[in-house]
Image (cartoon, rainbow, N blue to C red):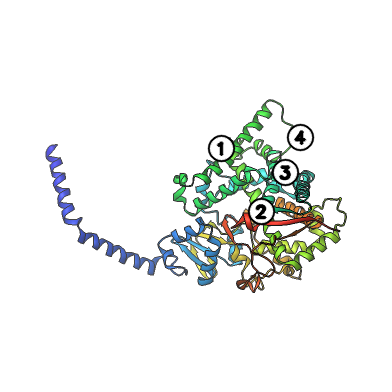
Amino acid sequence: MENTLVSLRSFSDIFLKKYCNSKNFYRFLVAYGVYKAIYLAFFDPLRKVPGPWWSRFTVIPYAISRINGENARYSEKLHNEYGPVVRVAPTQVSISNLKDIKNVLASYRYPKSAEYDAIILKEPNVLTTTDEPRNRMRRRQIGPAFTFTGLETVEELILDTGTRSFKKKLIEIIENGDGVGEFNSFNFFQSIASDVIGLLTFGKSFGAVQNDGHSVATNVNGALQFSTIIRAYPALKPFGLLFPKLLSERNALRQMCLEAIKQRKNDIENGVYDSSRIDILQMLITSINSTNKKNLTNDELVPEMVIMMVAGIDTTSVTMTWLLFIYMVYPDVYAKVKDEIRTTFPDRSQTIKYQEVRSKCPYFMATLYECMRIKAAVNGVMFRRNATDGIELSGYTIPKGVDMGVYTDGAHFDTTVWEKPESFMPERFMGPDGDTLKKNVVAFSYGVRICLGRNLAWMEMLTVIPNLLRDFECKLPADSKYGPHVLDPTRNNEPLLLEDKTFATRVPQNIKDDCRIIVTLRAD
């Protein structure tokens, strides 16, 4: 035995001396470099797709743009330089052509990429799952709550919790300011959306509007930023403690949902739950998984509740924030939309309802569509995996296994579809091509994975904003750095829009200062 060990040591010494020296190390590097150059030049399946030089070797520069909230602007720069299909990593491309984007999103042939696995909370939810049967199952379980028919059954509750509550709060703010009040549009709209989604999800409002906010909105913002970082660079998932504040906010949201689930199950068990009251939590608790014929476990329930909070609060409130700001810097648009709403709904004792707005206010609807086009709430890039043998995108063949990033702004600024895409032109949706153009706004995504809660978003936006415009007067504060005469040369000298960051949703960069709105009661 001892002789054998001596022989092995001698062999290893000879091997190390002969092969593991500096000369052979450099030879290896040269050989690897030659191999890599030949591979990239002749065999790399993405070699014909244009992109920055580093994209052949690493995802890091692109991931950094996602982590710091600059991905939308970075993607715009890349597509302006390289075209509608851009390589952004060794096995990732970004696409900006509307036709290509619809092709990728239309069916389950191109499932969500593996980066969504990185943000799963024990079990995937309806948004993060990459599995088609699970997505179909969850949509069947939750979907009825978000149909217009389902929402109409709770419309009065939504109006009480959202529209009527915010009107009461604004009147209070105005009275406390001796006839002139100020509110932060982003925070205010988040509070409205929080209360509405709390009602629909848990059966009760958070009271955010009347109490000047609720921690759930902060938790949602933190969870979104954390998930964006992990999706951009999944290798960071085991190191979540590097982002303690964001991680704690995500965990707080998870814990809140877990406590609500436990409380509801206790209420049911003790016979104190009102069975006539149906909300999303109750729909999920009573649902049966088609895979195992069992009720959902807590590990399955929590992720679904979390995504209801995240999707239900941020996207709607962000869109309303952008829309009101756009009205403030486009006074002619603001005057015209106010006139339409006030003429159509003169009785201020009656709350304006969404169906009436949808059918009677074409100009308001056009401004909303144009807002969602020019400042889509969900922005950045969402990746789909090519699970087929290949797909043709703008003349480039994308092979199996490559992730395709859907760049939403690219679709909304596609010059083959939109005239003067940089300009705010709501009239484009009122002409003979208006209905067709509306279908080209992919702010709620497109195809089989289209946003499940889009009808709720429509209901909130079509009640909150029209009631605000009819009953109140709004304007930017005198010290705002924005206004009708502050122009942006990159947008045909139209008004400068808010600086923003994209962490899944496109939020104003300086919420505290730039989202202030002066409000008074309507004079006449």
Q: Earlier in the sequence, mark 3 or mark 4?
A: 3
Instruction: Examine the rendered structure and indicate whether residue 216 appears above or below residue 322.
Output: above
Rendering coords of residue 256 (x, y %): 61, 38
Q: Crowding at label 4, few (<14), some or many (≥20) Cα neighbours within 10 Å?
A: few
The reply to whether callout 2 and callout 4 are in contact (CB within 8 Å) is no
Q: How far apart are marks 2 and 4 (CA)?
A: 35 Å
Q: What residue type is labelled 2?
A: Phe
Quadrant (top left/top right/bottom left/bottom right) for the C terminus? bottom right
The residue tagged 2 is 186
Q: Which residue is drawn at 77% across and 47% down?
A: 172
Q: Which amino acid does label 3 sit on?
A: Gln
Q: Which of marks 3 and 2 is nearer the N terminus?
A: 2
Q: Which amino acid does label 1 sit on?
A: Asp
The residue tagged 1 is 299
Rendering coords of residue 300 (x, y %): 58, 39
Choose top left, top right, bottom left or bottom right for residue 89. bottom left
Secondary element at image label 4? loop
Left or right relative to 411: residue 122? left
The residue tagged 3 is 210
Q: Which of marks 3 and 1 is in front?
A: 3
Secondary element at image label 3? loop
Q: Which residue is more in the foreground, 327 or 95? A: 327
Rendering coords of residue 105 (x, y %): 60, 59
The reply to whether callout 3 and callout 4 are in contact (CB within 8 Å) is no
Q: How far apart are marks 3 and 4 (CA)?
A: 27 Å
Q: Which amino acid does label 4 sit on?
A: Ser
Q: Residue 276 carries which label?
A: 4
Q: Crowding at label 1, few (<14), some or many (≥20) Cα neighbours within 10 Å?
A: few
Q: Distance between the residues labelled 3 and 1?
A: 33 Å
Instruction: Examine the rendered structure and indicate whether residue 147 appears above or below residue 442.
Output: above
The reply to whether callout 3 and callout 1 are in contact (CB within 8 Å) is no
Q: How far apart are marks 2 and 1 (CA)?
A: 32 Å
